[in-house]
Each structure stands twice: as structure tokens, then as C-alpha cells.
Image (spheres, coloured by chain):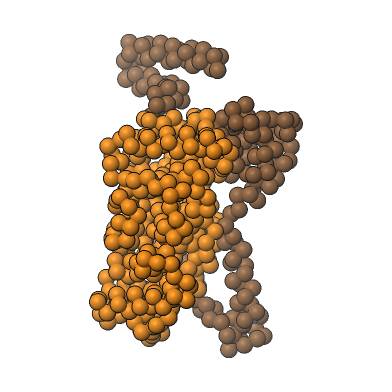
Chain colours: A brown, B orange
Amino acid sequence: MLCDICGKNPATVHLTEIVNEEMTELHLCETCAQAKSQQMEQQFGLSDLLAGMADFDKPVSGEETISSQCPNCKLTYTDFKKIGRLGCGECYTAFRKYLGPLLKRIHGSGEHAGKVPIKLAKTISRKKAGTEELRLKLQKAIETEAFEEAARIRDQIKELEKKQQDENAAE
Amino acid sequence: MQLNDFLNHTSEWLKGTGPHSDIVISSRIRLARNLAKASFPHWADKLQGKVVLEAIEAAVKKNNYFKNTASFRLDDVDAVDKQFLVERHLMSMEHAQKSENKAVIIDTDEVIAIMVNEEDHLRIQVMQSGFNLFEAWGIINNIDDLLSKELSFAFLPEWGYLTACPTNAGTGMRGSVMLHLPALVMTRQINRVLAAIAKLSFATRGLYGEGTQASGNFFQISNQVALGHSEEEIIENINGLIRQIIEQENQARQALLSKNRALLEDRVNRSFGILKSAYIISSDETIELLSMVRLGCDLGIVNKCMDRRTINELFLITQPAHLQKIENKKLTSQERDVKRAELIRTKLKIQ
Ligand SMILES: [Zn+2]
Ligand SMILES: [Zn+2]
């Protein structure tokens, strides 16, 4: 039997592949079998996070990369590039403009969508989901012609938005 | 509680129970958490590290939920015991490298393991037998809530939990499932499956995590993306992938049975024969042979089969540190190979 791929050498390796739920037999010579398994190996290669990080030397929005330092733990952005680890939670705020694009590159998406620590849950859900939830309620109230309630909700939203603006200004 | 107590105890992940336990050995969820403002372990000085360790131990002690846990400071744990913990999947190999200000907090059932001052201040792990990620999530979510009442975690609304390595930021969660895929390996389809897994941004590791080779047909599959999706979504994504792999492994097993039954029976029963009669055997060979026997038992082609729990346990107690703990002395590699064979022969005779 000759090799299915090159058709020249005798087939010594017999592979079973299931393609679209159908088993197909592949008869390959040593050389072609090796090439095939290497090709598969390469596709497999554990996605190397540092490879993704390697090109973050490229200019990102800011220019003064080197001089940035975390005021809390004193780690510099250069340190981070060298060791691939941040120094403390505050580093994320200190290096915000560089980390934003990097996080997007690693995770493919920008915003946290998971759980929130209990202690912060109240303030954050108010900030993030508070107005959205109220807007939905408002829409429903209008749809059901509960105008009194709608007016009340509208005032709540205004109040909440004002509060958030004040908080943001304070930060 | 002492480490030796674990010797006579079956690890949660080896129970051989739970959904799909013929193919799925165990499900594990890990959460990375850090204390706000404190330097991450690699960047902290000695004193900072100590403050973090003590704060975490105190938080655990304060809550009655953790009454069946003990904290083992790695400064007080010798090399064999460290390896023993790694073999039981209670801590990572990386955690075992250095010991200053590091600890691992474990519960008596070995369901919960909290590594303190590993890459992050806290690496909380919950392990379940079989295909059971949501069960594990329920437990670990509660633990995280309890700890977050005592500790302030580093967190930003838009980036979630902040971790030493930005790859873990967001949920800080990694769900992983340990699979036994001998038929996909035997039918040489495994590389194709692994390629597909990598394309979907999931990672594959071996029996012992980060940087280890897959051995004995065991593969650990976990999510890589931690930010931008909720914990439940991430778990649902892993589950979807695992269901497909289980399906493919089952198909390959059936294909082997119908097309190559004699070959399969030969390999399985030869493996069993070697285990029953060998006088010197390495750890690698043991894992390879046990993998075949496990497959044979799952498919019902071995006479007088052992139960799954016994097979699973043999994988563990034949590991180097376990052998030395059982013998209660240091053994050279050659001595271990002899003792290992002896232990296996005894266990298989009892069966
Ligand atoms: Zn060829
Ligand atoms: Zn910092």
C-alpha cells in the first residue's frame, strides 16, 4: 500500500480520522505522518501569553511609558514589561492607558462582566446597572400608562445621574 | 489535622463518582484574589508578605465555615510533604518552589485548598469528582463571599479582580476539567482535538498543571479568557466544549470496540498482566498501564475488574512522594520502582 499523501513511499503509519462524524483511514509513510503530526502540534501550541505581550512595546496612546510609576508600590511600567507581572492592584490605575489595550488583546473584550465583591456591590451596581434598570422600569411604566409611577422613576434617574456626576468629579 | 491524615483518605478528585466519571476525572475551579493596596507576592518584601499571610489566616479562622480547615505554612513543610501536596493537587508546583510567607489552607475533605502568596495573594481552589463545574462554582462563590467580608480585594468595576498577571484579571477564574481520553489517543485523533481546543482559546495541560506534559492519556482543559464574560458564561462555555470531547471519546471507544476489539483486549489485558506481575516499575509506566486498565474496565473487557476508585487511587499512591510517605522513609528512584511494583501487586491481589 502506498502513502495517501505522497503516493510514493509505502504506507507504514495508519491513522484514523473522524471528519464530520465519519471515520476515515489514512495510510501514510513515515515522513508524511511526521509532517502531519507536526502540523497538528503547531496548531495546538499553548497560546503563549507572553507572545501576545511581546509587541506591547509598540507606541500606545501615551509616550512617557518609561517614566510611569505606580505611586503605591513603586513598580515602573518598565519593570512590568521586564517581569510580566504588576506590583499591586493600584498599578492597574497607574498604568490604565497602557493596560487597557493590553487587556483587550489578551481577553478580546473590554469590560468585567462577572461578580463584584460584596462590600462594593451596592455602590457598583448603583453606578453601573442602577440607571439602566430604572430606564427599563420607566419604559414599562409608560407602556402600561402608569404615568404617576413613570414620573417618579424619571426623578429617580435624574437624581442618580446627578449623584454619579458628583462622585466622578470627586474622584 | 496533620498532613499524614490525608494518607488514609481518598481525595475528592479520585472518588470516581459524579457525572461522566468514566471520562471526566475531576472538575476544578480556581479564583485569584488579591488584597487591595498590598504588593503582589513577587513584589512584596518580607514584612509585607507576612502581613498578608496573617491577614488571610485570620480571615479564615474567623469564619465557622472553615472550621474543618488547617493552614500549613510552607516553611514548616519538608520537601517530600510539599511534593505530596502537589501530587494530591492541593497546591501547584510553582507554590512548592519557595516557602517564605507561603501557606496552603486545606479542608479535611480536600475539596477546598487555598494557596496563600502564590502568584496572587489568594488562589482559592474547589475540586469536585466527575463533570461538575457548576457544583464547584457554587461552593467557591460562597467561599469568596465569606472571605470578602473580612478582606478588601483589589477590584476595579471595569476590569474586575486585579491580579499579578493581567491574563487572570477580570473574574480571576479558571475552570478546568481533567479528562481521560485513551481512545482519542489510540485512534490518533487527539492532536486534531487539541488543535480545535486551542483555536477556541482554551488551554490544555497535563496531569500536573502548568507546563506539564500530558501523560497516561490525561488532559486538563481550562479557559484562558477571564475578562468580559460572567463566571457562569465561562463555565457554560467550558461545559459545551467538554460535552463535545466526551462525545468524541465515546465514539472513538465504540469504534475501537467494533473494529479493533481483539487489539484492544490484548492491550488492556497485557497491561493488567504487567501490573499484576512486575517487580520493578516506573511511575510513567504505571500511569500508562493503569490508563489502559481503566479503559478496559470502563468498556467491560477485563475479567474481575477493580472499581474505579481503586484504580484512581493507584494513580496517586504510586507517585514518588506518596510511596515515601507510605514507607515512611526517603527512597531512591530505584527503591521506589521496587516498592511501587510491590504495592501494586498487593492492591491487585486484594481485589
Ligand atoms: Zn508519503
Ligand atoms: Zn502598584
Looking at the picture, tell me which residue is in the foreground, B172 or B200: B172
Q: Is residue A98 above or below residue A41?
A: above
Quarter where residue B5 is shown:
bottom left
Horizontal side of B141 relative to A66 (left or right) equals left
Horizontal side of B141 relative to A103 (left or right) equals left
Residue at 52 percent of width and 53 percent of height = B97
Q: How many discs mark residues in the rendered view?
A: 0
Looking at the picture, tell me which residue is in the foreground, A50 or A75: A75
Quarter where residue A3 is shown:
bottom right
Q: Residue B256, percent across and down?
A: 40, 78
Q: Quadrant of the C terminus of chain A?
A: top right
Residue at 52 percent of width and 34 percent of height = B48
Q: Quadrant of the N terminus of chain A?
A: bottom right
Looking at the picture, tell me which residue is in the foreground, B317 or B141: B317
Where is ligand 1, by quadrant?
bottom right
Q: Residue B323, percent across and down?
A: 39, 68
Q: Residue B328, percent across and down?
A: 36, 66
Q: Is residue B310 above or below residue B13?
A: below
Residue at 49 percent of width and 53 percent of height = B96
Residue at 36 percent of width and 11 percent of height = A152
Quarter where residue B321 is shown:
bottom left
Residue A21 in view of the camera: no
Looking at the picture, tell me which residue is in the foreground, B100 or B149: B100
